[in-house]
Image: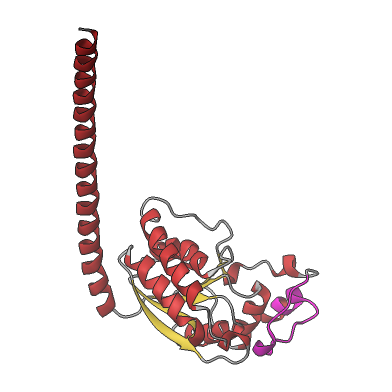
Amino acid sequence: MFRTKWLGRWVRRFRRSALRRSALCRLLRLSLGLVIGLSLCLVLHRGVAMAQAARQPVDAVLVLGGSIRREMYAAQLAKANPALPIVISGGSDEPCIWLIFRRNQAPMENLWIEPCARSTLDNYRFGTPVLKQLNAHHVKLVTSGSHQTRAVGLGRTILAGHGMWLSLDAVPESGRPGNQESKLKTVLDLIRGVGWTVVSQVYEPPCPSLHRLSEIDLAGWDGQSYECEYQGHVEIPPSLEQLEDLDK
């Protein structure tokens, strides 16, 4: 008798547990279906926006830090296209960029300095919100040829998630920027980029130090230690503030 009652209780518990597991499985399947459905809708919507953006003219430039030659090229772009907004992400020290633009007599009002980035992924983490603020759709990427595989892969993955198209403008390099990058690093960064594409739909970190090159505080840089990469052939004056006064 006791064994029969115990067996009956065990059967009822098993059925209740099976029902709970079944309900949980149905809920998980439903949730997964919703996530996949929403993801497909997002991909379709972004894909249409990106296809349209690819046919538009370039309306913003993103310059990745890592070589002063990229900033020299940015100065040429700014001089040829004064109305085109340019974002330099994680670039050289600001006085070096200012001196390059001054030497080229390039306008500084549409040049944005984003100094928060410390890696290629950071370039897009902090650069994408700036490009969105500029209402960019077709972004020209300025980087080195040896860096283009990782930079373009990350950029097209992340910017596509925000309806922007990325085209490449590789700057000729010599020396260290011309070295080949690790394939493993490229693959790992691309995986991280896919993850950040999802996260960036709900969260994007702002760069509190974002500012225009024309707003640089040259007096604040006087007396500070900074160096300009030798390939830029930038001659550092004794006083940046006095040099700025000569231009007025």
Q: Is residue 7 above or below residue 78?
A: above
Where, quadrant-wise, is the N terminus in this rendering?
top left
Relative image position of residue 115 (x, y in whole percent): 59, 66
Q: Is residue 236 left or right of residue 136?
A: right
Can residue 82 be seen here? The reply is no
Comparing 3 with 233, the one in front is: 3
* Residue 229 belongs to the span the image colors magenta: yes
Residue at left 31%, top 80%? 57
Q: Residue at x 24, y 41 (%)?
A: 28
Residue 100 visible: yes
The quadrant where residue 68 appears: bottom right
Left of 234 or right of it: where is 2?
left
Q: Residue furthest top?
A: 1
Display coloring: secondary structure
15 or 151, which lies in front? 15
Residue for point 75% across, 82% down: 236
Residue 69 position by quadrant? bottom right
Magenta stretch: dominant secondary structure: loop
- For the record, the magenta segment spans 225-244
Name the residue: 27% across, 70% down.
Answer: 50
Left or right relative to 179: residue 188: left
Q: Look at the image and tell me in which quarter the C terminus lies.
A: bottom right
The relative height of residue 123 versus residue 63 in the rendered view (above or below) is: above
